[in-house]
Amino acid sequence: MDFSDKKVLITGASRGIGYATAEEFLALGARVAVNGRTKGSVDKAIAELGGGDRLVAAPGDVGTVGGCESLVAAAIQGLGGLDVLVNNAGIVKTGFLEHTSLADYRAVIDVNQVGVFLGMRAVVAAMRDSGGGSIINISSNAGMEGVQGVIAYVASKWAIRGMTKTAALELGRHGIRVNSVHPGGVATPMIASDDFDSIDQDAVFAAQPIPRVGQPEEIASLVLFLASDESGYSTGSEFVADGGGLAGNTSRGVD
C-alpha cells in the first residue's frame, strides 16, 4: 500500500493503537495529524515519531464540540485537506451497573461515542470537497457482546457500530467509506491500568484460538487496509481482530 501525499487524522494518537497507526501511515508515505487531549501529549508523540513536516499537531478533546471542531480544523489546515479519519480516541471506566455513577457513564460516552459522532460530522465537508475519503471508527469486540463491569464502555462501542452503518449509508454517495474495527485485548496502556488488576489476563488470552494478547501494530495494519484502495468495495462493515475471542465459547464442546 502506498499512502504518499495522503492526509490522515488520527484521534488518540499519542499512545497505543493510535500511535502505532501513525507510525505505519508515516512509513508508507502519508502526512499525519496527531491528536491527543493535551498539547504536551501531542508534542511528545510527534517527537517520538521523528518530527518533520509530515506531522501536524492537532490537540483537543474529541468529546466536546469546540474541542473536536478545533482539532479537525487544525488537521485540515496543517495537512492541506483530509483523506482519512481514524476515530481512535477512547477511555474506559470500570464498575458493575449498580456502582457506576452517571458522571462516569457520561464521561465514557462523551469520548467514545460522542467523539466519533463529532469527528465524522466535522470531516464530511472536507472529504466531500476532495472527492471522497475513508473513515475508520475503532470500536471493540465489546461492541458485539456484553462484558461485565464496563457497562458504559460496552454501550459506547455498540453505538459506534450503528453510527458507522448509518454514516456509510449517508456518505457513500460522496465517495466516503465508513467502517468499524473491533479489536479484542491489545497490549496498550488501557489494559495495563490498575482497573484490570483483578482480571487474570493471561488466562483470558490463553483460552482464545490465538492464545496471546494482540499487538497495536496488528490493529494498525487492519486500519491501513481500510484506509487504502485495497478495501475500495467495503463500507458500513465490521472488521474484527480479537484472536478469535468472538468465535465461540471455548469452554463448551465435544471432548
Image (cartoon, helix red, strand yellow):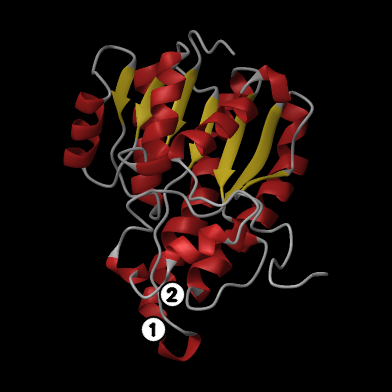
User: Dividing the image into 4 quarters, which one contains the N terminus?
Assistant: top right
Above or below 95: residue 14: above
Q: Residue 54, located in which quarter of the rendered image?
A: top left
Q: Residue at x 73, y 57 (%)?
A: 247
Indicate the amino acid at tag 1: Ser
Q: Amino acid at mark 2?
A: Tyr
Q: Residue furthest front?
A: 255
Q: Observer-nearest residue: 68 or 57?
A: 57
Residue at position x 55%, y 42% in the image: 120
Pinpoint residue 37: horizontal percent, then vertical percent.
28, 47
- Are circles 2 and 1 on residues that touch, CB within 8 Å? yes
Q: Which residue is mark 1?
A: 101
Report the disc number at residue 105: 2
Q: Nearer the viewer, residue 199 or 172?
A: 199
| Relative side of 220 to 93, left or right | right
**Location of residue 216 with respect to 230 vertically, above or below:** below
Would you place residue 10 above or below residue 142 in this image?
A: above
Q: Residue furthest bottom?
A: 98
Per the image, label 1 sits on a secondary structure element best described as loop
Q: Residue at x 37, y 69 (%)?
A: 196
